[in-house]
């Protein structure tokens, strides 16, 4: 059983940056591919980025490509999402999720993910 905990959300002005973290206190996150999803009010959950367990594969949705960077530190058992040049339309609850595969196959479909965190709210507003 994987227990995912997101952190790093908050209020930021347009053009600003935030770094989200996804940690697994149990220490087994390194064996999973990890995806970041977000859900804005009234919208469907959107898969925005994924990183394979061995770091060899990353995926970015067009909506965040060039602005967001996913990375992982398997020693610290944490996956990060660096978000730069934030826009008001990035406002959403951000979730990390894990899948028991070594790659990001099936992503960005949220139905393929095995474990989910509870989310962290990101608000981009002036």
Image (cartoon, helix red, strand yellow):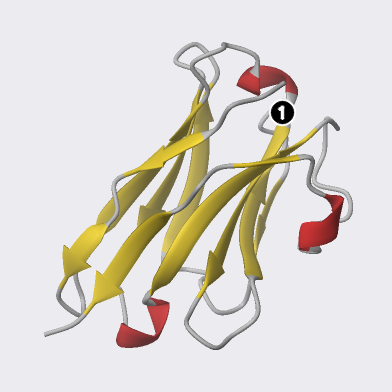
Q: Quadrant of the N terminus?
A: top right
Q: Is 107 rendered above or below residue 19?
A: below
Question: How far across and down, in percent of the image, does residue 102 sit?
Answer: 83, 30
Q: Considering depth in this image, is 5 or 68 the residue closer to the camera?
A: 5
Q: Residues within 10 Å of mark 1 (few under 14, many from 20)?
A: many
Between 32 and 42, the one nearer to me in the picture: 42
Residue at 61% from the left image edge and 77% from the top image edge: 62
Tell me where residue 44 appears, x and y as whole percent. 65, 80
- Measured as percent of width and height from the top left, residue 18 is found at 26, 56
Does residue 23 appear in this view? yes
Figure check: 68 above or below 32 = below
Does the rendering let one see residue 84? no
Q: Nearer the viewer, residue 80 or 117?
A: 117
- On the picture, is 95 further left or further right than 21? right
Compared to 113, does 3 lie above or below? above
* Viewer-closest of 112 and 87: 112
* Residue on which the image places disc 1: 53
**Residue drawn at x 39%, y 86% as measured from the top left:** 89
Q: Where is residue 120, by image quadrant?
A: bottom left
């Amino acid at each position: 059983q994987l227990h995912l905990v997101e952190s790093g959300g908050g209020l930021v002005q347009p053009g600003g940056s935030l770094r989200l973290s996804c940690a697994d206190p149990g220490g087994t996150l390194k064996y999973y591919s990890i995806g970041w999803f977000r859900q804005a009010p009234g919208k469907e959950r959107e898969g925005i980025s994924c990183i394979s367990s061995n770091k060899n594969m990353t995926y970015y949705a067009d909506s965040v490509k060039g602005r967001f960077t996913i990375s992982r530190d398997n020693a610290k058992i944490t996956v990060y999402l660096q978000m730069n040049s934030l826009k008001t339309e990035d406002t959403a609850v951000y979730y990390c999720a894990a899948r028991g595969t070594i790659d990001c196959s099936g992503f960005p479909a949220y139905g393929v993910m095995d474990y989910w965190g509870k989310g962290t709210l990101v608000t981009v507003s002036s």
